[in-house]
Image (cartoon, helix red, strand yellow):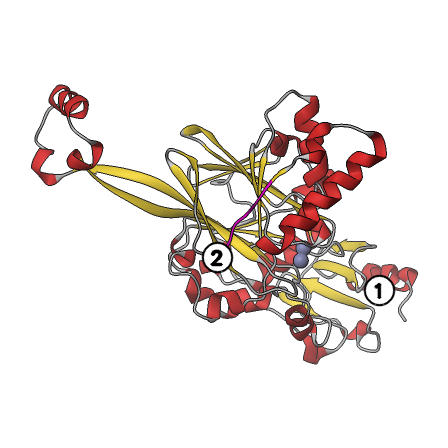
Amino acid sequence: MLKKHEVLSFASKTKSAGRIYKRNLHQDLCLTLTRRRETVRHLNDEDHFFFLNRRGFHTSKPSLTIAKKKAGSIIPSKSSPSLRGWLTLEGYRIYPWSISGLETCVVINAEDDKKLAVTFDIGYTTRPSVRCQQVFISHGHMDHVSGLFQHATKRSLYNLSPAVYYVPPNLVETLRNVGKQLHSLSGTPDILLDLDIRPIQPGDSVLVTPEYEIRPFATFHRVPSQGYLLYHRYKRLKPLYRHLRPKEIAVMENQCREENIYEVSWLPEVAFTGDTTFELFLNNPPADLLKVRVLILEATYLENVTPGIVRKARERGHTHLSEIIDHAHLFSDVERLVLIHLSDKYSSSFARDAVSFQMPPSLLNKVVIATLAKDRS
Ligand SMILES: [Zn+2]
Ligand SMILES: [Zn+2]
């Protein structure tokens, strides 16, 4: 095994461009080097470090070279400014708190509709999520549901109305019972005795504001799971009335039913996958899933240096970045992709580098990596 001081020594001798990462990515990002170098012969005998230069990843074993760098944008791009952790994408404000296995809690607001404030998954109770009265849960793993009781408690402390928790049907009774058990610990708050937990499944829909609706869809995970599509209601004057002046339209609105004046349609805007294998996109995906403006999808595994990592991702019910890249054409109609649920073993900088080095420009230009929870932890 290559010791750290050996790597440091190597770096000082080679003056190569790029970075050396320890195989155990969680522990250490060792070095940033300064000059371009294409190959790293010095590490051929070792398997605990790999090298990332400006042309691509070079592992200790040449056969494990995993990517070539493609031209593309820096992530997140300037068109997706981040303000105190919030992303602003395609008219939506998104607070994407997520680390695989630890906590996922993604809040969605609309820039043009203050009424829209929903949370997808509640594995941790972020401050923005406390303001959400409607929470949609993808599945029963702790990193997606365990914050429910704290969410209810915090809203009670702030004198906010009780939230509604929409969950896969198999979770309803268990969660209600856990609420009662937690109440028995301290006798408060009473809300834990009567949590508003409602079953929801594919085929159902929930009107979360007059202008927004949420519909679940089935996903592929180790336990029953589902993702959610957010639809926005649009209306357009019927051709017959498009010549009218605003005053005349206002008069008609007072006299007629809306559907007599307008063509009304619901368009898919945002999708949240929760945890799923990539099979979601290959095996008869929901018709609107790949038409959304913002797709929030899991990418638990990013690196290719570990043999069998893609198979491991599938076995664990997760997605590997390479699967997204291999099927980049599927996302041609999606405006932005937000990658969430990254493994805790990746640092934020490694995640950004891994994605930017491997992704083709067509995808890279629309990708945002959710490192918020890593950066704030
Ligand atoms: Zn998870
Ligand atoms: Zn899970």
**Which secondary structure, mark 2?**
strand
- Residue at position x 43%, y 69% in the image: 284
Image quadrant holding the N terminus, namely bottom right
**Which secondary structure, mark 1?**
helix
Magenta region, residue range: 197-202
Q: Position of residue 16 (x, y in %)?
A: 73, 62
Looking at marks 2 and 1 on the same chain, the residue that comes earlier in the sequence is marked by 1
Looking at this view, is 8 or 230 the one in front? Answer: 230
**Callout 2 crowding tier (Cα within 10 Å): few <14, some 14–19, many ≥20:** many
Q: Is residue 208 left or right of residue 166?
A: left
Q: Are marks 2 and 1 in contact (CB under 8 Å)?
A: no
> What label does residue 217 carry, if any?
2
The answer to which image quadrant residue 90 occupies is top left
Figure quadrant, ligand 2: bottom right
Q: Position of residue 108 (x, y in %)?
A: 52, 38
Inspect this view and state whether residue 329 appears.
yes
- Residue at position x 79%, y 55% in the image: 26
Look at the picture and state if 254 lies above or below 86: above
Residue that badge 1 annotates:
10
Inspect this view and state whether residue 377 appears.
no
The answer to which image quadrant residue 193 occupies is top right
Inter-mark Cα distance, 2 to 1: 51 Å
